[in-house]
Amino acid sequence: MQLRQHEPELRVIGRSVGRLALQCIGSLLRMHLLSAAVLLPLCSSWGIAEPLARVRLDDPFLLQQLHLPAGATPAIYGLEFSEVKIPTEEAAVWGSMERSCQREMPQQEAAPTDILAALQEKAAVGSEQQQQQEQQQQQVFQQQQLLQMQQQQQQQLQLRGWLIPAEQSSSKKAIICMHGWLSNRQACLPFVEAAKNLKLHRDHHILLLDLRGSGDSPTVRRAVAAAAASATREGARGGSSSSSSSCSSWPFEGAVSQLAVDAREDLRAAAAEGDWMRQQGVTLQHVLLDSPICSARSLLQQQPSIRRLARSVLLLFQHLAWGLGSRKSAELRRLRACLSLGSLASSMTTILVSKEDRLQAWPLLQQELLLLEECKRPKATFLLNKGAHCQLAAANAEAFEQAVSHAFVTPSLLQRLWQRMWQPGGPSPPDAQRLSPKDFSALKEEQQEVRLHEQLQLQQERQEEEEEMLELTDTQDEADM
């Protein structure tokens, strides 16, 4: 009887639960399809191992955003330059492999001749000895093919760039300009213009690089080099079966683990090369960061147009981590694409950022800097009121030039005394702010005071509500009496 009485309510509940289940199933299917759509191009590119260019030179959109003519080079500023090629770490690996193969080749070639001489002396060729001879000849042929492939690959493992030599040939100072994602070395030309106005080219060599996969530099991933190295080792040890199995097993696992390994290794590259720099007598004195992104995860979450895509990618990572086992999943869980500002010395870092950055770099950067101690914050942060992402030179050339001057121009003794006595923070450029580590400390104190004030207000409101409740209970008790 009770079920019949509540039959309308039960029908409504059943319909709502069914609709909710259908919505959940539909959303999961959409997310899986979107994840597959994101994954398939990546898997196909990694599996084929073909270079995928991000932004080639003379990209019309990039030139339009930077207000540069077609075929822009340092020559438009009247500076002499030369094309350079710099080998990458994979090129060094290929070179060592090539030298080892060349050392092993004479030994491998001499072995079949010795066997043939022994067989002729004995005049009895057995089936086992013929098989050994064929295997050794096959190994020599495979090593020759690997050697040719290594020579071709080593020629491609070079970063392209422009080198602007200093007017003082004996100078030992150099400025290395590296662009960001979806860009190339032409994006560094506005910096070259500011450097020329500040006369930095007189005693500084300036190098503009195309990072891997951008401009004229090839796309070579570490997984490819590691797989080729393992294939070469297996082939040299003996057997075509082992080398073919190692080559066929790397694409999927290597490509997926590369998502975590590349981000982590790229961020720690400067710290890892500290020993090499000290051995070579190279010191890193100044760093200028233009529109840095501190947290890629927070950036994706703040972009409304790609939130669903970001969720699908995160879901895809979870599925891949579950399917690859504990070791691969541990690498994916440790994935944290974060700019390690704390690893850079505060006395050599200068940051340039805009409030109108469509990627919202300033709020994320502000949160990151407030978490650091005052001694670890950058020595200066130039906050521009206008300017798009990585296009601050076109929006405010004076502020951009002042930031470059603050980072790379060493002031004289009188200028330093003047700044300490009258202008400790330095003058702020027009339409911009120059923030020091103490300014961030003051901002942090203000935020803490605001939070304390809000907490006190909440406590007062709760006390007032409790007092009102007590008064109501007292009046009810009096009415009952």
Image (spheres, grey):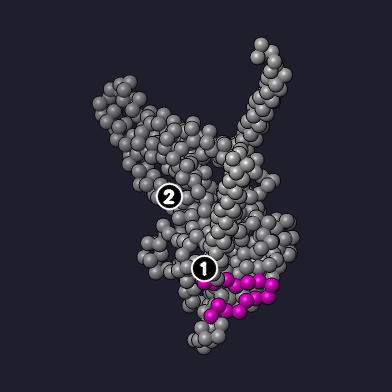
Q: Nearer the viewer, residue 46 or 466?
A: 466
The residue tagged 2 is: 93
Instruction: Please state the horizontal and vertical placement of residue 311, each as a whole percent of the image.
Output: 60, 40
The residue tagged 1 is: 441
Q: At label 1, which amino acid type do we have?
A: Ser
State which quadrant residue 343 falls in.
bottom left
Residue 144 can be seen, yes or no: no
Mark positioned earlier in the residue sequence (1 or 2): 2
Q: Point out the image quarter for the C terminus.
A: top right
Q: Is residue 142 magenta?
A: no
Q: Nearer the viewer, residue 147 or 85?
A: 85
- Tell me the element at label 2: helix
Q: Residue 103's mark?
A: none
- The residue under the point 69% across, 13% down is 4
Magenta part of the chain: 424-438
- The residue under the point 63% across, 50% down is 302
Q: Is residue 128 left or right of residue 263?
A: left
Q: Residues within 10 Å of mark 1 (few under 14, many from 20)?
A: some
Instruction: Please state the horizontal and vertical placement of residue 204, each as a whole percent of the image.
Output: 53, 74
Q: From what the image shows, is residue 394 above or below residue 250?
A: below
Q: At label 2, which amino acid type do we have?
A: Val
Q: Nearer the viewer, residue 228 or 140?
A: 228
- Tell me the element at label 1: helix
